[in-house]
Every structure is written in C-alpha cells, then in structure tokens.
Image (spheres, helix red, strand yellow):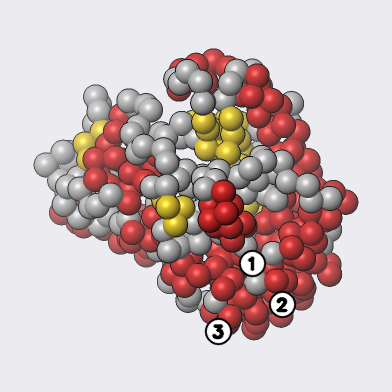
Amino acid sequence: MPSPTRSLSLRSARDFVTERALPKTTGNRVGLELEWLTRSPGAAVTLSELRDLLSSPLPSRSTITFEPGGQVEISTPPLDGCSNAVRAAAVDSDLLRRKLRASGVQTVGLGLDPVRSEDLVTDQDRYVAMRAFFDARGPAGARMMCTTAAVHVNVDAGSDDEGMRRWRLAHRLGPLFVAAFSNSPLVYGRPSGWRSARYSAWLDIDPTRTSPAVDGWASYALAANVMFIRTRDTFVALDEDMPFARWIDEGHELGFPTADDLEYHLTTLFPPVRPHGRLELRMFDMLPEPWWRAPAVIASTLLHDRDVGARAWEIAAPVASKWTEAARYSLTHPQIAAAARDCFALALEVMKCDAESERVAQTFYERYTARGRSPADDRLIEFTTAGALYPADETVEAV
C-alpha cells in the first residue's frame, strides 16, 4: 500500500525491477500455462462451483486459476526440459477436463470466444478495478479479460548473457509465433478480419503495458501506466494516465508508491514476452488438443538451442516488427509465412521432447506452417461451410 512519504527513487526502482526480471537459473527448465474457455450448454455453472469442482490437487502439481470471464487455467511448475513440462501439462489437463465434462462444462481450445458476453463472473476487487481501468480506455479490455484464452510457454533465462540472448530472440520470433498459432478469427459471431482476434484485443488496450518491451524491461515497467492503487480496503482504478515513474516523483493523493506497490504493478503488465524470473511467452492463441504441444516444442527448442537460434535470428529479421500484420493476416502474409516455415523447420530438425509431442509438432508443421496456414483457417472454413462457431471436435486426430 502507498506511503505518506516518498520511499522509492527512480534508481532504486530500476534496480528493483532489473533484479527480479531475469535471475540466473539452471537454463533448461520449461513451464506451460494452458487456458481454456468454458461453456456450459445446460444450466450455467458459477465460478464458485468451478472452484469447488477443481479444488483437489492435480497429480503433476500444476496450479489451477480462474480468469474473470470463467476461463480455467493450469500452470505447471518449472521442470527440466520440454518433455517433463509437456507430460505434466498433459496429465493434469486431461484430469481437469474430464472433471469439467462430467459436470456439464465444456473446455474450448480457442483464442477467443466468438459469442460469449463480456461480463465478469467475479466480483474480486482486482478484476473489478482492472475492468474499470480498461473500460475508461475502450472496449478491447473487456474482450481480453472475459473472452480470450492462450498458451504461455515459459523458459529459463539462464546466465546473464544467455538471458539477454533469449530475451532478444523471443522478441525477434514473436510475430512468427502469433501468426503460426493464430486460432481466433471470429468475434461477435462473424469473421473479424483478424486471424488472431485475441492478439488484436491486446493491441487495442493500453499500449504502455501490452506492447513489446524491446527497449528494456526496467524502462518499460516505469513508463507503464499505473492501473490502480491498492488501499487497505479496496483497489482504486485510475482514470487518467500516470506512468509509475511519475507516481514515484509526484505522488498521488493516496500516497507515494512502495516497493510492494512496484512489485504488484509488475503483475499488471502484459507484454508478449514478460520477464519475471523466467521468460514468459504470451503470444500463442489457445489451441485444441493436441496442438498446444506444438508451440511448447518449437518455442523451447528455438530459444534453448544456440546454433538454431542464431540461424532463426537472421531468418526472422525482415518480419521482426510485424506484430500487427501477424495477428491480422497470419501465414497468408508471404514474408511471415516464409520466415515461420524456415525457422520452424530448423527447430524440428533438432527438437528434443517426448516422442508424442515431437510427432504433434511435426504434424502441425506439415498440416499448417509448411502450407502457409494456421488453425484460424480451419475455423473460417468451418464457419463458412457449416456456420460453426466452435471447433467441431475438441480432440484433433494428429498422431
């Protein structure tokens, strides 16, 4: 909570952010976060009922969280290598989804729900204040909070030099990942003109907290607007833009920020590559079974293998800034398609994961990337030919 007197300087704040961004780690751990949209065609299931249903621990120790639109997410612990992370995610997600199905709740592997309302299903102070902050700036924030779902791939930073190499490479490859794994072309029951309408929603909300942080994390964090100020009793959303650095310098009627406020501020920043003890890659739309394995295999391989990463760095250079084009056109964009095809082929040559996940990644590449397609193209075909808003079958026969 804020202090009545100034307790942070800009220098101490920069040091605080930097120390927590990319600490030295073992270098080879991977963690996965899988987030599903949920549907209950029968009687609606409340968030409290979901919590009760999923209150038992998962066998691979993944944590379960619930997002403000009713999305359900599992997060594996950081584990040595891609194989262990994917196995943990597969075991825990299978159990979670079977529990939900047995209670009449369907999980949906899409990046954005094409028909769900943008109403909160929670009254938690954090989410109510977040919604107020976004609503003051346009409708995209509500869409992001309540109707989107993603795959997040987390990789260790490694040593100081290795961490910076992976940080820069993740940003260089980011547009390729957005494009190749796009899976959300429908909004409000019709084609939106974007292959990844999920990522387009992120592009449309406060850019100080969602644009790529390519110029350095500490500078980015201090330039980002304060979303809300926590008091003893509640969260106070800010209507006016106030970068965190200004809060340090000028204060607010509620006080000056503390280190605790700065640490909490970092949890409200959502760039496509977020460093918080690891590199969290947040640019992948959620995918149906078993396709979520493909971004885990391909991304972790490209970031872990120095030789392959160096070659991918050069290949991706011409499209490194094309985040918007990637979300709008996916692999119908010729330059992005060529770069994704070549970079992913490099990863497939040296990938080291469990056999099933390697087969999934290879099949995904052959079915989509090598042909200049993404899963969003399947969604558009299903909508055009049958009016389908959701994938016909939650399990895709891939291997």
The quadrant holding residue 13 is bottom left
Q: Who's the residue at 51% across and 20% down the image?
A: 42
Q: Name the residue under label 1.
A: 373
Distance between the alpha carbons at the discs numbered 1 and 2: 14 Å
If you read the primary sequence from the N terminus, does the residue marked by circle 1 or circle 2 appear first? 2
Report whether residue 156 is seen.
no
Q: Where is residue 397 in the image (x, y as percent from the top left)?
A: 78, 47
Which one is in front in this view, the residue at disc 1 or the one at disc 2?
1
User: Which one is nearer the viewer's eye here, 226 or 177?
Assistant: 177
Q: Which amino acid does label 1 sit on?
A: Arg
Residue 110 lies, with reference to residue 208, above or below; the image says: above
Q: What residue type is labelled 2?
A: Asp
Relative to residue 114, is residue 379 drawn left or right? right
Q: Name the residue under label 2.
A: 342
Residue count near mark 2 (Cα–Cα under 10 Å), binned few <14, some 14–19, many ≥20 = some
Q: Who's the residue at 71% across and 55% down the image?
A: 294
Query: Which image quarter holds the N terminus?
Result: top left
Could you tell me if the residues under marks 2 and 3 are in contact, i.e. CB atoms within 8 Å?
Answer: no
